[in-house]
Amino acid sequence: MSELIISVSGLRGIVGETLTARVAVDYAAAFSAESPPGSVLIGRDGRAGGAMFAQAIAAALRGLGRHVLDGRVMATPTVGLLVRRLGAAGAIQISASHNPIEYNGFKLFGSEGRVLPADIGARVARRYRDADPVAWVASRDIGGFESVEDTITAHRDAVLATVDVERIRARRFRVLLDANHGAGSLLGTALLESLGCALSTLGGTPDGQFAHAPEPTAEHVAPVGREVVARGADVGFCQDPDADRLAVLDETGRYVGEESTLAMCLRHRLSQSAGPIVVNCATSRMAQDLANQFGVPLIRSRVGEAHVADAMIGSGAVFGGEGNGGPIDPRVGYVRDSFVGMALILDALAQHGRPLSAWADELPRYAIEKTKATLPPDRLAAVLDRLESTFSDARSDRQDGLRLDWSDRWLLIRGSNTEPIVRVIAEARTAVEANRMCGEARETISQVAANR
């Protein structure tokens, strides 16, 4: 990766190569210029180098006259909640999410305690790219610096308020939490102990020294599944480094998955309160089936947390999220939140009294296949036109690339914002069918790329 990965919600890069302290200073200045007056909260996910970037960002913000609130290591959803509780103008979370250990990055929050809306994030990115000048303040106007001493209680209490705490406590669930040396262990421990769980933790020190690759996929967390069985746990919870995503393992050590995390949360929440739900256009059809089951509208947004939050706020959704294991509960905040996921799943298990394996097996079953193909950006429109024509029996949606929907399967083709590729995702009843759909899409892409 020779360049920074810049999106409307932040940026990521390789530390010491594309991501440096100078980048941190310039990006913080661009963010400050697009933010309302007030203090700015800084958090980080525990990766090596995070403290250095926090110091650079704090110096830049103070040099622009901003009062800095230092939250040190904390989860990304906690940042969003504390922005609201502290009345901050915004926040910068230092995290590369699920990227490999050599990466770090910055995620931007507005005063509403959610990832910046796309239009504001785009303005920050433009200012950074254009190196717009900023007005540094004189010594008498340098901003202050303040440590936030308690970054756990408010978030823990907000999550506890969404579930039946006593019902969960009565079950004394045995839980294995794999924080993988990210930020999630701090609040995760407090929350699960408050819920009366007999807790075992893997990677509880938030130092960024990951025991396995940071994205909680089936392959990466296979050793955790074996630990679930060895320790006799009822459930295993696996977080990514900044704890906005959650993968789940049942009592047999089976990977229930990230897509199923959102589906399980949706099912439990809709059983309590009917209302619109929002997912992005790359999320499993399980969400649509659940919406049909409960008779509520399902709204699909563009891919990206900011777009999901926009759609949730606009529709008054009771729940939402992304299929990468990122549930969003508006009662807590409009941020993907692994802690919300853990609490809701435990609440459902306590209510129904069945093991997680049995409850998860009741979800609609689909197979998702993901691939990519090389394509110059100027050929993307032609590819989408050809695919829409080829699959004319499908319902098409162009809000984010091209999504083609049938009654029991779908296909999504999206161009990358950072590479000359298209991403192809298909979901069907079987892996064979999903693979076939991906293959047909790739063949069409190859033909258009070759001007055939």
Image (cartoon, rainbow, N blue to C red):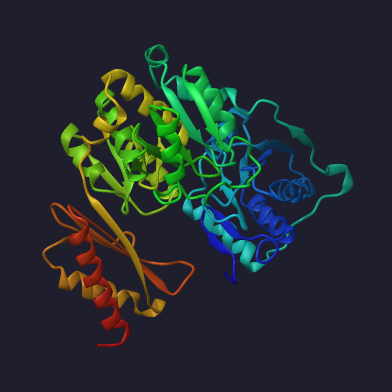
Looking at the image, residue 293 sits to the left or right of residue 184; the answer is left
Of residues 358 and 32, the one nearer the viewer is 358
* Count of picture labels: 0
What x and y, as percent, mark residue 308?
Answer: 39, 46
Looking at the image, residue 378 sits to the left or right of residue 448; the answer is right
Looking at the image, residue 351 sits to the left or right of residue 128; the answer is left
What x and y, as percent, mark residue 315?
Answer: 32, 39
Task: Note whether 89 is above or below 18 in the view shown.
Answer: above
Looking at the image, residue 399 sits to the left or right of residue 174; the answer is left
Task: Note whether 25 is above or below 161 in the view shown.
Answer: below
Of residues 11 and 179, the one nearer the viewer is 179
- Inspect this view and state whether residue 129 appears: yes
- Inspect this view and state whether residue 401 appears: no
Of residues 226 and 309, the one nearer the viewer is 226
What x and y, as percent, mark residue 222?
Answer: 42, 46
Task: Note whether 126 is above or below 420 in the view shown.
Answer: above
Residue at far right of view: 139
What x and y, as percent, mark residue 388?
Answer: 20, 69
